[in-house]
Image (cartoon, rainbow, N blue to C red):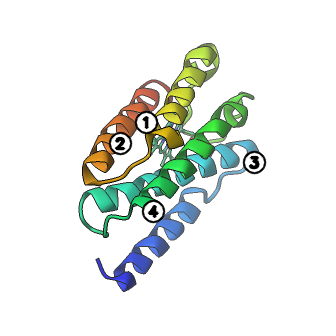
Amino acid sequence: MTHFKTTIFAMTLVATAAFAHDGVQNEAVHARMTAMETIGANMKILAGMAKGQSAFSADAANAALVAISDTATTIPALFEAQEDDPKSEAADEIWTNWEDFVAKAVDLETVTSPANGISDMAGLAAAMATLGGTCKACHREYKL
Ligand code: HEC
């Protein structure tokens, strides 16, 4: 992928993120959706490299991993209060199964910890598989 296309791709992500939050009134819901968007945007950076749409860079891959890990640490605090908004896709089960929800956030933090750094394409593929599993495990139970 050329530098120009990469820039367009990054701009598309930003535009999508802004659009997804249109009409969210509740600030707490907005904040947790923004955190998830950050996680999603960094996941897309990894996916782009894994699919060969952008050149592999261990530095960029690890930066994305750290960004996801850092954001994962904020999930419990962002979701702790049971806030709602018509645009929210958060399931009520988050607050009835709170400890399990937090454990799933910690799982994401663990698999993206700097100790699990990516050094080559095989490592990237392995990281993507593990990471994707943690997103799905939580979304399956707690995202509408
Ligand atoms: C601990 C649970 C949990 C984990 C782990 C998790 N998510 Fe989420 N995610 C949620 C919940 C809950 C919502 C819905 C939030 C809302 O709408 O209020 C959500 C929403 C999202 C959204 C939509 C945000 C928006 O603006 O509407 C994206 C994108 C997303 N997650 C990406 C990811 C990716 C990618 C991963 C894995 C790398 C991941 N999530 C891991 C719980 C989780």
Q: Amino acid at mark 4?
A: Ala
Image quadrant of residue 46?
Answer: bottom left
Q: Amino acid at mark 1?
A: Cys
Give the foreground label among 4 and 3: 4
Q: Which mark is residue 135?
A: 1
Q: Earlier in the sequence, mark 4 or mark 3?
A: 3
Q: Label 2: which residue? A: 127
- In this picture, is 1 found above or below 18? below
The kind of secondary structure element at disc 1 is helix
Q: Amino acid at mark 2?
A: Ala
Q: Position of residue 40 (x, y in %)?
A: 47, 51
Q: Earlier in the sequence, mark 1 or mark 2?
A: 2
- In this picture, is 10 found above or below 24? below
Q: Earlier in the sequence, mark 2 or mark 3?
A: 3
Count of numbered tags: 4
Q: Are circles 1 and 4 on residues that touch, CB within 8 Å?
A: no
- Left/right placement of residue 53 relative to residue 28 reads left
Q: Earlier in the sequence, mark 4 or mark 2?
A: 4
How crowded pointer 3 is (Cα within 10 Å; few <14, some 14-19, many 20+) is rated as few
How crowded pointer 2 is (Cα within 10 Å; few <14, some 14-19, many 20+) is rated as many
Q: Earlier in the sequence, mark 1 or mark 4?
A: 4
